Image (spheres, coloured by chain):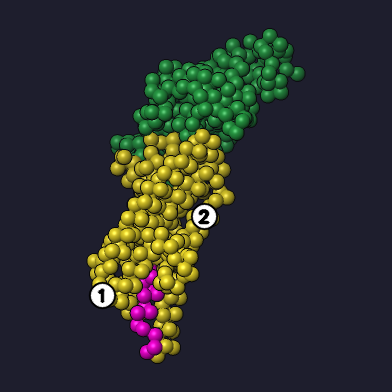
Chain colours: A green, B yellow
Amino acid sequence: MVIEVRDLVKVYDGTTAVDRLSFTAARGEILGLLGPNGAGKTTAIQTLLGIIEPTAGDIRIFGQDIRTHREFILQRANFSSAYVSLPQNLRVMDNLHVFARIYGVDNWREKATGLLRLFEIDRLAARKTGQLSSGESTRLHLCKALLNDPELLLLDEPTASLDPDIADKVRKLLRRIQRERGITILYTSHNMREIEEICDRVIFLHHGRKIAEGPPREVIARFNQQSLEQVFIRIARDGELQEADTKPAS
Amino acid sequence: MNLRRISALLLRYLLLYRQSWTRVMEIFFWPVMDLLVWGFLTNYLINVGAGHVPALVTFLIGSMIFWDLLYRAQQGVTISFLEDVWARNLLNIFVAPVTITEFLVATFALGIIKVLVNGLVLAALAWALYAFNVFQLGFTLIPFVLSLMLMGWAMGMATVALIMRWGHAAEALAWGIPFLVQPLSAVFYPVNVLPAWLQPVAWAMPCTYVFEGMREALRTGQAPWEMFWWSLGLNIVYLAAAAVFFRHLFGIVRARGLLGKLGAE
């Protein structure tokens, strides 16, 4: 297993953000972490990345504890989020240069150029990052996330600012890269169609607790709904619902 | 500690200056304006004193330059951190295999570069405009400047810890904290000018020994090494205290998930 999380708990000032969360992710698997705002997705991801200290529980990535092997794990992982940016005043290539150096990427220029080409933004290499559109910026961020050939990729709403055409291209590209390289991806999104398309398995969180887990089709069937979006809506509105209680969403 | 990662972070800060003339000007603008004010004030005091004001009054120019070096060392740490906050790049840095020590060392290195560049520019201007030669202190200058940098780093570390803990609301501390220290550390006047009850506070500041030492060196022509050793000793204590303080607050920041909030706001 690439990710092994056991009984993860995170409590902030008396509020439980993540409540006894356990899950695993296998090599080459795309796992969707879903849930309404405040469900605990971001806390779970940031705890996995070692920037939040868990209250209790164990996190092992590549078989190692994140608390004691942070550098080893982060050298083999990467992260992209719609909510963080790369320095706007630096040129696209300069940003990739800095991160290539941080990760110790050999032949960084060749690697960066290849990734920019892959995401169809190679023409922007000399442009300042602040001059990119949000879609171009998101694709640049994905280039950064792939610079070190990660074995684990944590993507927090990576297509949030993309138009449907580019979002579709990015999803297909991510799928292709994941198949070719066997990367494990932990993926969060509020776009349930996207999740159905890209994820092998999903975990639904509500108030920090895992309330459903399985391949998207199985989860949809188990909750007696037509789509993952309907499951999401039911969970958001009746968070404590049990699988047996479910009825089709109106 | 990985030198490649430190150099990568340093490269990121240097590239930022290459891309932004306003940032480059910001480094020089305020110190040059300060130098002009203090330089002309010094000239005025000498002229109006007509021989009654000792030539030693030129120490005001040296004090201003030394103060700026301390300030630049502190800013090297704090503004570099804030650049990553403002750019929403903080999470990218901390989800990379960068350690907090590597991050701080990179900002210290940037502080050294700023101090060197700024120091040379101000020294050249002071000599050209006011015939004040900061190098008249000779090699004594080097350890004293080093001591100022150490204090700047200690203040910078403590400031970054406070900003991490209290977020954007605490950003003003990046500029405010040095000026909290300035009136108490005998930058432009000797310690004995301060009220008696404040003098022990002044002598608890490492930079006080540097400024007093500079004045003594200009007056006597002798290097006041005792002052330097006191300054160095206090700096070691301050750096250790700042490191403990930083570690403590960083623990709180990780426990409360504040880094993610600061990095994405």
Q: Residue furthest front?
A: B196
* Image position of A29 with respect to A47: above or below: above
From the top left corner, tell me how far across and down residue B68 is, in percent: 40, 65
* Image position of A121 with respect to B170: above or below: above
From the top left corner, tell me how far across and down residue B84 is, in percent: 47, 47
Question: Which residue corresponds to mark 2?
Answer: B173
Secondary structure beneath dot 1 equals: loop
Apparent side of residue B222 relative to residue B247 in the rendered image (left or right) = left
Q: Write the residue at 47% across / 37% down.
A: B251
Q: Amino acid at mark 1?
A: Gly
Q: Which residues are magenta?
A: B51-65
Secondary structure beneath dot 2 equals: helix
**Foreground of the two, B172 or A100:** B172
Q: Are marks 1 and 2 on the same chain?
A: yes
The disc label shown at residue A107, or none: none
Q: Write the residue at 37% across / 47% down.
A: B240
Query: Can residue A12 be seen?
Result: yes
* Image position of A159 with respect to B60: above or below: above
Question: Which residue corresponds to mark 1?
Answer: B221
From the top left corner, tell me how far across and down residue A77 is, in percent: 41, 29
* Image position of B34 with respect to B206: above or below: below
Q: CA distance from mark 1 to mark 2?
A: 37 Å
Q: Are marks 1 and 2 in contact (CB under 8 Å)?
A: no
Which chain does tag 2 point to? Answer: B
Which chain does tag 1 point to? Answer: B
Q: Write the residue at 38% across / 39% down.
A: B99
**Foreground of the two, A132 or A214:** A214
